[in-house]
Amino acid sequence: MSKSSSRKAPAGPRTSLRERAADVDASAARVLRRKAEEPAASQSMPLAKTQADAVELSGLNISQLSNLFDVFEAIHHQWLAVGCQPFSEIHDPIVGVRPNAAGNLAEQEASRAALIRDRIADEVRLRKPQDDWQRDEALSLRIKDAILCEGAIRDRDLLMEAVKAWG
């Protein structure tokens, strides 16, 4: 039996360094082509920050701000959960799991909710409570925000204020 000249040897492990380098180059080219064909990734943070900064909070009282803080924290977690759903992800064999268009939207909305929540906390820090109820609302919100951001109350003045208020 004679071998045909157009027939290649069975595929096996490549031993040549040159062949391995060619495989890596081809793989990288495929990834780059795929990236170039995708719509540009959403630049959610700048847009979310601009929109969060535009939210008007000055007309709200401490109680309203405190309740909205809790709502925006819950919304933030809801959007994070949406971003983890199978319909929000692409499973790429080379890159791994990454967000698709739905996942990018969920990330943008989660960022917006977190930024508005942070703005609410900043607004409450600027307010002077008029009574014990407002003081407790503001202090509770500031403690929740500290724990969300730091994992603990690291601000000694905040801790002392809580001890003084609630003894």
Image: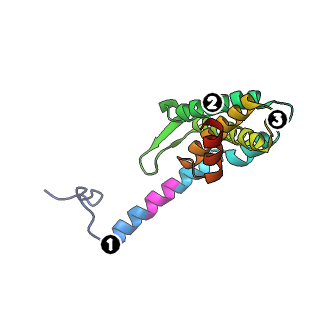
Residue plotted at (80% across, 40% down): 127
Q: Secondary structure at mark 2?
A: helix
Residue 160 at x, y percent in the picture: 62, 47
Crowd rating for badge 3 (residues with CA inside 10 Å; few <14, some 14–19, many 20+): some
> What amino acid type should be assigned to the residue bearing mark 1?
Leu
Q: CA distance from mark 3 to mark 2?
A: 18 Å
Q: CA distance from mark 1 to mark 2?
A: 52 Å
Residue at which label 2 appears: 75
Taking 162 as reference, is 82 above or below it? above
- Could you tell me if the residues under marks 3 and 2 are in contact, i.e. CB atoms within 8 Å? no
- Front-most of 12 and 60? 60
- Judged by its main secondary structure, the magenta piece is helix
Crowd rating for badge 1 (residues with CA inside 10 Å; few <14, some 14–19, many 20+): few
Q: Secondary structure at mark 1?
A: helix
Residue at far left of view: 1
Residue plotted at (35% across, 66% down): 20
> What amino acid type should be assigned to the residue bearing mark 3?
Leu
Number of numbered discs on residues: 3
Residue at which label 1 appears: 17
Residue at which label 3 appears: 57
Query: Which tag is nearer the camera, tag 3 or tag 2?
Result: 3
Which quarter of the rendering shows the C terminus?
A: top right
Bounds of the magenta segment? 25-31
